[in-house]
Amino acid sequence: MALNEQHRKKFISGMNRRVAELRVQTETSLDFALETMFQERVDSYLRVEQGLLEIDRMLGLVEGEIEEICELSAAQRLESRLEFIEDRFDEFDSEIRQRPRRRRRKINLFNFFKAASGGAGMGGEPTAAKGEIVSSTQAFEVLGVEFGSALPAVTRAFRERAKKLHPDIRQGDRTSEPELRRIIEAYQYLKTEYYNGPQADSFNPPF
């Protein structure tokens, strides 16, 4: 049975809205996983990240078919696919946000290397190192992205570099810790000072 034009437009609008909302939720959950899982459970983080990236890929496939839908049966099949993707997202999101904590207090990514402010390093040795990032220009440069890039692009660049430098991924090799500490500091600096600082009001991200 063919969809009449009114129902077709309503279907397209509703599906596009659901896809857009799920994309935002997926990116938010990926950021939350990066903040809460990466430093303590890197294997779980990598699995969750892969799952969420696959969800984003599947959303792209669904999005590419929405405008072509003309038949009721095709609309029902496509909506069922989207519902499956939404269910998969709920599974990952539940794991990310409801995972039992193994530590007495939650630590965020910025505190992963507390040594940067004079605490103990990952190996337990005290250090007097202080923060090295003092400007947004420097932070963008450290992360290897163009100045003024949108936060999602900065986050992607950080994730890619952090995964390559994490000791767990490098079979316990800690020689990359200084560089990892530096990109963590740069990422946190941009999140707190650039995107959420006073200049954020006038910032227009280049999407």
Image (tube, helix red, strand yellow):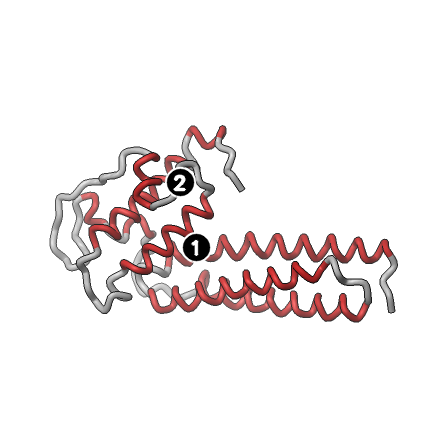
In the rendered structure, which amino acid carries the disc numbered 1?
Answer: Phe
Residue 67 point in image, percent of width and height: 74, 57
Residue 194 point in image, percent of width and height: 40, 35
Residue marked by disc 2:
146
Label 1 to label 2: alpha-carbon separation: 24 Å
For label 1, the crowd category at 10 Å Cα-Cα, with few meaning under 14, some 14 to 19 and many 20 or more, is some
For label 2, the crowd category at 10 Å Cα-Cα, with few meaning under 14, some 14 to 19 and many 20 or more, is few
Residue occupying image coordinates x 16% and y 52%: 120
Q: Nearer the viewer, residue 36 or 184?
A: 184
Horizontally, is 144 left or right of 170 in the view?
right
Residue marked by disc 1:
32
Residue occupying image coordinates x 35% and y 69%: 43
Q: Secondary structure at mark 1?
A: helix
Would you identify the image quadrant in which residue 160 lies? bottom left
Would you identify the image quadrant in which residue 207 lies? top right
Eyeballing the image, is 17 above or below 149? below
Q: Secondary structure at mark 2?
A: loop
Residue 204 point in image, percent of width and height: 51, 34
In the rendered structure, which amino acid carries the disc numbered 2?
Answer: Glu
Horizontally, is 143 left or right of 98 in the view?
left
Q: How many marks?
A: 2
Horizontally, is 42 left or right of 2 in the view?
left
Residue occupying image coordinates x 16% and y 45%: 118
Residue 77 point in image, percent of width and height: 72, 71
User: Mark 2 and mark 1 in contact (Cβ < 8 Å)?
Assistant: no
**Disc 1 versus disc 2: nearer the observer:** 2
On residue 165, the disc is: none
